Amino acid sequence: METTVTELRFALDTFYFLISGVLVMWMAAGFAMLEAGLVRSKNTAEILTKNVVLYAIACTMFLLVGYNIMYVDNSAGGWLPSLGGLIGTQAEGADHSLESDFFFQVVFVATAMSIVSGAVAERMKLWAFLIFTVFLTGFIYPMEGYWTWGGGFLSEAGFSDFAGSGIVHMAGAAAALAAVILLGARRGKYGKDGSVHPIPGSNMPLATLGTFILWMGWFGFNGGSQLLISDAENASAVGLIFLNTNAAAATGAIAALIVSRLKWGKADLTMILNGALAGLVAITADPLSPSPLVACVIGAIAGVIVVYSIVTFDKLKIDDPVGALSVHGVCGLFGLLVVPVSNDGASLMSQLYGAAVIFGFVFLASLLVWYVIKVTMGIRVTAEEEDAGMDIHDCGIEAYPEFKS
Amino acid sequence: METTVTELRFALDTFYFLISGVLVMWMAAGFAMLEAGLVRSKNTAEILTKNVVLYAIACTMFLLVGYNIMYVDNSAGGWLPSLGGLIGTQAEGADHSLESDFFFQVVFVATAMSIVSGAVAERMKLWAFLIFTVFLTGFIYPMEGYWTWGGGFLSEAGFSDFAGSGIVHMAGAAAALAAVILLGARRGKYGKDGSVHPIPGSNMPLATLGTFILWMGWFGFNGGSQLLISDAENASAVGLIFLNTNAAAATGAIAALIVSRLKWGKADLTMILNGALAGLVAITADPLSPSPLVACVIGAIAGVIVVYSIVTFDKLKIDDPVGALSVHGVCGLFGLLVVPVSNDGASLMSQLYGAAVIFGFVFLASLLVWYVIKVTMGIRVTAEEEDAGMDIHDCGIEAYPEFKS
Amino acid sequence: METTVTELRFALDTFYFLISGVLVMWMAAGFAMLEAGLVRSKNTAEILTKNVVLYAIACTMFLLVGYNIMYVDNSAGGWLPSLGGLIGTQAEGADHSLESDFFFQVVFVATAMSIVSGAVAERMKLWAFLIFTVFLTGFIYPMEGYWTWGGGFLSEAGFSDFAGSGIVHMAGAAAALAAVILLGARRGKYGKDGSVHPIPGSNMPLATLGTFILWMGWFGFNGGSQLLISDAENASAVGLIFLNTNAAAATGAIAALIVSRLKWGKADLTMILNGALAGLVAITADPLSPSPLVACVIGAIAGVIVVYSIVTFDKLKIDDPVGALSVHGVCGLFGLLVVPVSNDGASLMSQLYGAAVIFGFVFLASLLVWYVIKVTMGIRVTAEEEDAGMDIHDCGIEAYPEFKS
Amino acid sequence: MKMLTAIIKPFKLDEVREAVMSIGIAGVTVSEVKGFGRQKGHTELYRGAEYQVDFLPKVKLEIAVKAEDVERLVEAITTAANTGKVGDGKIFIQPLEQVVRIRTGELDSEAL
Amino acid sequence: MKMLTAIIKPFKLDEVREAVMSIGIAGVTVSEVKGFGRQKGHTELYRGAEYQVDFLPKVKLEIAVKAEDVERLVEAITTAANTGKVGDGKIFIQPLEQVVRIRTGELDSEAL
Amino acid sequence: MKMLTAIIKPFKLDEVREAVMSIGIAGVTVSEVKGFGRQKGHTELYRGAEYQVDFLPKVKLEIAVKAEDVERLVEAITTAANTGKVGDGKIFIQPLEQVVRIRTGELDSEAL
Ligand SMILES: Nc1ncnc2c1ncn2[C@@H]1O[C@H](COP(=O)(O)OP(=O)(O)O)[C@@H](O)[C@H]1O
Ligand SMILES: Nc1ncnc2c1ncn2[C@@H]1O[C@H](COP(=O)(O)OP(=O)(O)O)[C@@H](O)[C@H]1O
Ligand SMILES: Nc1ncnc2c1ncn2[C@@H]1O[C@H](COP(=O)(O)OP(=O)(O)O)[C@@H](O)[C@H]1O
């Protein structure tokens, strides 16, 4: 009997991990649709290709080396992870199956990489992007992930990042920022006189669908990060996480709506979508400690931040077609820094420290990799290819190829 | 051991609630896609905006006041709920976590409101709609919900509505009908000679996707409404609910196909989609008592009803772009009235009584709110804005903004 | 206590079945979107109609007769199933609820049928297709399914097909091949000089979305096929199945990308999508025995096979708009034959035997049914209807009906 | 013969088509165009940046007619397409030297 | 010089283009249009309401040519676009006074 | 009066429109077309089969002007649309006999 019950707990926790993982895997489709909706149709097939393949590469690289680097046989509190391949062996008395743990972790890597594809859309070479994907998902992410979730020095330093506002989202944004700096803006985005020329995305229903998918998948992202559900305390915790996650997204959307209405007199749909995502990213650093009301406030603040952040990046001529830097970077940072407000176990100092370490490392490591790719094979398509659209050049097919006059 | 097992049941029931809730949350995306597909492209960005924001408002208002009104500290059998805010505290010995219960309930509110957005599409002012959303999700729905699910007088009167054919769907349709009456038909929908000018929706794949999403989400909607799954009886019940829900949707679609083939010689895709939804709405009042065969019959009848209902509303010049009044209103009512056929615990009288109370209250309360909004800020865009499309006016962006000659 | 725990296991296994079933149901949407994206827009509404209705018919026919044929009161090791209707009664001491078992099985039938709709797209009469659906889902599939999963002679012969590479996927492809042979190629696909004229699909985002949906749903398809999750061994098995399923899809996509890059210098998006699906189909025959690395290899080989297979079918002038024959037929067969490599319980001979029996039976039975339909009501639309598009003729509506110059 | 090209507001298309048919014209070719003229465009907003959209959706009708029908046709179109607001559009009349019906090879007035 | 405008059935575009090229014409401008004429439209159905769709999809080719090429071109197009069924389309021939090649500023026959 | 038809590269539209406006022309009608000419198309790939896409996206501008404005307009367009690469496009000039403003019934130069 005793064993049966223990195994039953093991089974439930494993099942909970797997279902959470499926929801996070689904976020890959969310990013694909969001980005496909926010680029011009001449670059749509290419961004779809990037999103499918980055997910595939992330899953393969994390299986081959990444998971091992991040989680297996590492020393507690260290800087350097042990090196090795594959996923190790099931530990005695583990709470859930090793494979389910891998599955839940691997989909996070893909999320981090999906953030990059949006920011560099419409101008980065397909193959440069894919090569970078190999490095980020196989090495850079696992390394910095080890520092906190794998038991490395950041976890010892008291840095607290429940489901990855920093480790996943801000890290993805850091890699994206490095790329955007080397890459430059899309042709025609900024006038010589400093003016901003908006380049509207081609398909709002896709962008909205993508956002809904992400919102849905986030319940797995944050809900699964409690890691256990099979007793009352953990189950209640997961329940609260769902509630808070949803609440922060909701108020993020509402806040972005209100700001855009006050500033421009209109309901700016893509800002609202970004507002919901901003709320989600911000609450991800700690969806468990805040009360639902506090979660609402965190989401709302993130929704305001994201609007101003997007406008500011544009003023700085940092061209980010989908707002990834603002949503995942700026709001990820905000999420980290707001943790101590509701979580006594975290301090502003340790949060700042962790954020600086993660951002600094991922940004510099990425910059290096991007730079090497740039000087060897190049990272940007030619102006002519950019004008004609990436689809024809990289994929040889258009997203909507029917004869349109 | 005893405790461990009890907690394990608590955990499983909580998990089941949360997953069911995620599926219902996903229905928000389903409504968004269905409605985006059934309006013209010049109104698509606006309907997307409405759908995202209504979900956000519903989640926020139900957290702030709605859940409390509907479920917390209410007297049994009463008319007036107690007033208060937030979601109360976890009861001793509860079957699942309070937060998971809230999450499961809140997504239902959003469903009710999503029904409205479809019926008033292509002509209602964005902000009038959003203000109404605050009232429906914060007050009107929680109030009538309390009467049955919160233990109020309808539950004592023997009114039976398992998962909300009446409380959610017909209620949404009642609020929509009140709006449509005050709002009038879209320009050009009805000729002066009484003729009907169809206004085809712009995107059938989106409408189909939306329907599949709703069909999928409905397993959470009905399946989760059993409220417990952790013993054999409840688990078997949930299994039967899944089977019946699926069967009714299937036969609803087939019936609508056959009717449209016989009447017009064609397979009318949007009628088939509405047929599936009609079956789902009808079985929602009681997906547990009927045998699978009876569920098939209920679905099929709903599939027939919905076709004739849509045609009839058009003859009455009640303009409902997506068929929400027929699907959720007429078939919701049918679902309520057919309960006594398979459920001995319900009587036709109590079902009629409950339906009349819910419809009457929601319709009148909504009419009042809509009316006040109408005389203060107006509910309908100008004819010029309607011709140019809501997207430009309310959102300042087109759904497919690329230069199309 | 004992009972409580036993019931709890029953409940968890039932819940696991239901959730897996929901994921497989969702694959119906995946096929619908994939196929809608890969046909021309003038045939899009019709393919959507086919996909919705085939799912509805499959659910109804399998409830009325199919499940009974496949699973109820059958003799072990036989050829001929018993005949009867409905789903029987819950067995004493069953592991999960009968209804949840039905639900999980019924969505597989729909998958088999969805495979057909893609291959015959853009030229088969709607009603001919629907009539065939009745036969495949009510009789042909249940019959061959009984031979393995229902305990018939193939299961006794040592044929091993864990989740249905052969029973579902290759069977669907066999039915499709029979249809394609009787139907012929789309007008204009092959020049008189033997040249191939590509007919690009109209909507790449839909095709990509469909693939992501299928990928997601496959976790239910394979993961649920373990049938039990409530103890440590089964839970770990399900975890490994998830991991392997995901890995094979990932390497399938990567392999197809690499082949298309080497052969044509471009990243052929729809080939990559097919590559992911090819990996999924191939691993389905046994997602449990291979190590993750072996699963990667199986997926990669399938990704290579599918590219060459698609090109070969085109050379043979067998016109398959979505690649269903290659993905589900050829890679399904490959999946079956590769099982003995990692699974000692299977032999190449028994796999060949099983594959031949299933393919032979389904192909011949389907050919007969298609043939009878062909000579009675016809299976192909007229050349004029084909030029004008199926949407106008069969559905009377266009997928994107707005005035386009 | 003359070739008339009319630029009109999109929602007037049905009325104009009926007007054209009612005076016995049997054929029209229609396309969607964008027009730029005295009628003001509008401001759109995308991710916090506003921009001016000057090109407005219009419909273009091309109608080949016998010279003697031109006047009646212009009359019919101007009446049907008129809303009295700026942006109602224009009619352009150009010489047309020959018309061929592809199916039969008929020429000119027989081809119309 | 003359400007030829041909309205044809969409699925004939490839054949017509080849026919045009085969007689040495180097440039064509193509657009999608909707045509209304003797060819009957069809009935569509939306949510239980039927309606008539009169405008059929057509393709328009505009080809500027030297006057002496007109005859051969008309011949080529009528042959290639012909299906013998109503709705095959028409060719319109209009005067063309000047052609300018934007890249070089070349004029008229040099610009073609 | 003359009717100018200019075929240009799509991404030049904004510049050309500004050039046209800057010389005082008040109206333009624009449409998306596909062009076939000396500029080479490209190869596309679909499911392992390659095919040639000859038609390239272009934008067509139609501008009705007084005869005396033609020269300046041609000048403005050629300058603005020029990239020096093959495929920059062409300008066609045709006679225009009459213009009617639908809203007011004004004719010819008043209608422009
Ligand atoms: N000179 C012109 N050449 C070609 N098209 C023109 C010209 N002027 C106007 N148009 C077309 O006519 C439409 C209406 O013109 P506009 O000046 O806005 O109003 P109105 O027709 O009332 O004078 C424009 O949108 C444009 O498509
Ligand atoms: N008078 C006209 N002016 C402009 N376009 C015309 C005219 N008559 C016909 N067309 C175009 O030619 C197409 C074919 O004409 P239709 O009368 O249907 O058949 P046919 O060319 O065989 O006589 C129409 O769809 C329309 O686009
Ligand atoms: N004879 C012609 N008639 C109509 N349009 C033409 C003709 N020749 C060229 N065009 C149009 O002009 C565009 C550019 O022509 P092209 O020959 O490619 O380059 P260029 O203008 O530099 O000579 C073509 O894509 C086509 O749309």
Image: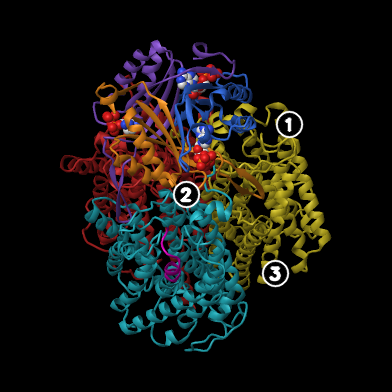
Chain colours: A yellow, B cyan, C red, D orange, E purple, F blue
Location of residue C357 in the rendering, given as x and y in whole percent from the top left corner: 28, 42
Q: Do labels 3 and 1 share a chain?
A: yes
According to the picture, the residue beneath numbered tag 3 turns out to be A294
Location of residue B278 in the rendering, given as x and y in whole percent from the top left corner: 35, 64
Which mark is drawn over residue A47?
A: none
Circle 1 crowding by C-alpha within 10 Å: few under 14, some 14–19, many from 20: few
Quadrant position of residue B167: bottom left
Task: From this view, report whether residue C1 is shown above or below residue B272.
Answer: below
Location of residue A59 in the rendering, given as x and y in whole percent from the top left corner: 58, 44
Query: Which of labels 2 and 1 is toward the front?
Result: 2
Q: Is the magenta stretch mostly helix, strand or loop?
A: helix
Q: Which amino acid does label 1 sit on?
A: Val
Pick whichever of labels 3 and 1 is earlier in the sequence: 3
According to the picture, the residue beneath numbered tag 2 turns out to be B41
Residue B179, magenta (yes or no): yes
According to the picture, the residue beneath numbered tag 1 turns out to be A372
Q: What residue type is labelled 3?
A: Val
